[in-house]
Image (cartoon, rainbow, N blue to C red):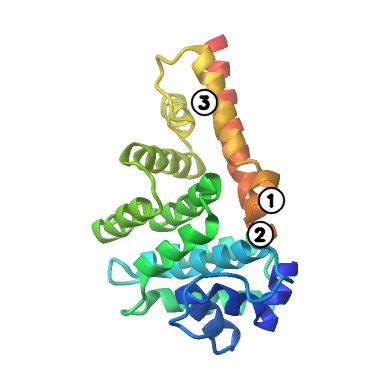
Amino acid sequence: MNWWGKLLGGTIGFMLGGPLGAILGASMGHNFDRTTSSGPYLSGSTSEVEKIQSAFFAATFSMAGHIAKADGHVNPQEIALIESVMQQMRLNAQQKQAAISMFQKGKEADFPAQEVLEQFRRECHRRRNLLQMFLEILVATAMADGSLHSAERQVLDSTARLLGFSDFEYQQILRRQQASHHMQGKAQTPVAALADAYKVLGIVKTASDDELKKAYRRLMNQHHPDKLVAKGLPQEMMEMATKKTMEIKAAYELVKESRAA
């Protein structure tokens, strides 16, 4: 939790600057210059990964608040999902307070979503898998109530575009998350469960066994917890990445079993 200690001290917020630095500052009780853009380090004591971890934390909770508010109100399911995220992260009291403050910031009418996303993308330095994990968390937030409101969809569309995802990649993420949501919900028929398993893996039923294995390995590599943490995913979010790999593995095993029958 080294990044958190430095965040408490104010070091990382000053180094980030820009809207993310301002969000961190407001949530941590520091006064950072909102106009400062992300730039060279002000100190050599903070690593690039720690800087990205703080940016990920701030961007995740503030954008979750922005998306939850997009349809005009925040419903109980969206609040429950954010509470679930905080529980999975095992945040301490201070971290929860900061996360809630960031979520509230995202709900404000003047929240600079575009600037936040543009800065977050710069901070990630093209770490594609990290950006994908971030987008998946936001999609899950929007789908928490079982539906995707048009206003939420517009925010997600813009988010995917600003993060550099093609429409095909983005649609794949949406389909995977929808299928994952179904599989975690009420009991499904075997046919429906298998159909969702294919969607989670991002392939069609006519895909060859070789294509199935490649899709599985690619997704497992993209969501490997240790690799994501090494690239800047906050250590506290490792359990979320682990859960995602378990969902992918479960889908793969289901498809394999259906083909062996």
Q: Secondary structure at mark 2?
A: helix
Quarter where residue 54 is shown = bottom right
Of the numbered discs in the image, which one, if any, rests on residue 49? 2
The picture places residue 250, in percent across and down from the top left corner, at 59, 31
- Mark 2–mark 3 Cα distance, whole angstroms, equals 28 Å
Front residue of 210/239: it is 210
Please report whichever mark, 1 or 2, sits nearer to the chain's N-terminal start: 2
Q: Measuring 44% from the left and 56% from the top, which residue is drawn there?
A: 138
Tell me the distance, in whole angstroms, between the alpha carbons under discs 1 and 3.
23 Å
Q: Is residue 10 left or right of residue 69?
A: right
Q: Is residue 92 visible?
A: no
Quick check: can you spot residue 90? Answer: yes
Q: Quadrant of the C terminus?
A: top right
Q: Work out which quarter of the rendered image holds the N terminus and state it.
A: bottom right
Q: Quadrant of residue 74?
A: bottom left
Image spot of residue 239 (x, y percent): 67, 52
The Cα–Cα distance between marks 1 and 2, rounded to whole angstroms, is 7 Å
Find disc 1 in the rendering and name its residue: 230
Q: Is residue 39 above or below residue 148?
A: below
- Decide: few, some or many residues near mark 2? Use Cα within 10 Å; few <14, some 14-19, many ≥20: some
Above or below, 211 relative to 177: above
Residue carrying label 3: 215
Disc 1 residue type? Ala
